[in-house]
Image (cartoon, helix red, strand yellow):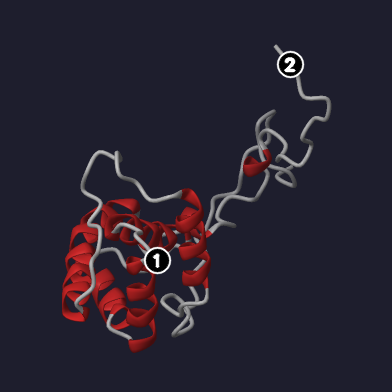
């Protein structure tokens, strides 16, 4: 068995994700849209935007499954604190139907992506498509409202208390 001579030291330090203060990440705060209806009111105008539809059609023509694109979008919404993962799971079928209708309207061949992954897209094509979507303004149209910071109780002093708690 051959070992690599050079080790990869560019990886994050184990536990690094746990070093931020509680509530410093968007997904650690209450979501901006807590119901399916509120989240749909956020997504539908953005999904029907001409610029987004054009980019989406280009990506679907490359063979990226509609389900992969929808799941990526809703996962991004979860990571930005727009909605919870539960709402994302409920949103995915609706967004897939919306995108499928747009693809049919454009008259392109598309992959739905409802198989078990046997005919998955090439990793290079998927990465290129996601890079193209980064420039999309689906999440950047309007600034999110300033969210109230949760009021926390005074922490107790102890071995596992947060820094500065004493």
Q: Residue furthest bottom?
A: 50
Whole-Å distance between the Cαs marked 2 and 1? Answer: 46 Å
**Residue 72 appears in which quarter of the rendering?**
bottom left
Residue underneath mark 2: 2
Q: Position of residue 23 (x, y in %)?
A: 55, 55
x and y percentages locating residue 71 in the rendered image: 34, 56
Q: Residues within 10 Å of mark 2 (few under 14, many from 20)?
A: few
At 46% from the left and 57% from the top, the residue drawn is: 125
Q: Mark 1 falls on what kind of element?
A: loop
Q: Residues within 10 Å of mark 1 (few under 14, many from 20)?
A: many
Q: Are marks 2 and 1 in contact (CB under 8 Å)?
A: no
Which is more toward the observer, 161 or 87? 87
Q: Earlier in the sequence, mark 2 or mark 1?
A: 2
The residue depicted at 49 percent of the width and 60 percent of the height is 150
Find numbered disc 2 in the image and state the secondary structure of the residue it sits on.
loop
Going by the picture, which residue comes out furthest to the right?
A: 5
Q: Nearer the viewer, mark 2 or mark 1?
A: 2
| Up-down relation of residue 54 to residue 66 (above or below) | below
- Quarter containing the C terminus: top right
The percent coordinates of residue 104 (x first, y second) are 16, 74
17 in relation to 46, above or below: above
Q: What residue do we see at 28% from left, 56% from top?
A: 67
Q: Where is residue 122? Give x, y as percent.
A: 43, 50
Residue bearing mark 1: 82
Q: Is residue 91 left or right of residue 61?
A: left
108 shown above or below 28 = below
> Total label count?
2
Q: Which part of the image, by quadrant, shows the N terminus?
A: top right
Looking at the image, residue 162 sits to the left or right of residue 122; the answer is right
Q: Relative to 109, is 124 on the left or the right? A: right
């Amino acid at each position: 068995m051959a070992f690599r001579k050079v080790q990869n030291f560019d990886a994050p330090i184990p536990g690094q994700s746990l070093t931020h203060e509680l509530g410093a990440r968007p997904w650690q705060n209450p979501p901006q849209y807590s119901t399916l209806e509120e989240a749909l009111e956020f997504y539908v105008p953005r999904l029907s935007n001409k610029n987004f539809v054009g980019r989406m059609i280009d990506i679907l023509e490359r063979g990226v499954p509609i389900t992969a694109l929808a799941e990526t979008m809703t996962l991004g919404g979860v990571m930005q604190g727009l909605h919870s993962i539960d709402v994302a799971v409920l949103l995915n079928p609706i967004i897939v139907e919306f995108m499928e209708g747009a693809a049919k309207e454009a008259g392109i061949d598309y992959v739905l992506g409802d198989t078990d992954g046997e005919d998955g897209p090439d990793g290079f094509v998927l990465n290129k498509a996601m890079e193209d979507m980064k420039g999309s303004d689906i999440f950047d149209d309007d600034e999110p409202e300033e969210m109230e910071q949760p009021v926390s109780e005074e922490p107790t002093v102890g071995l596992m208390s947060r820094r500065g708690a004493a």
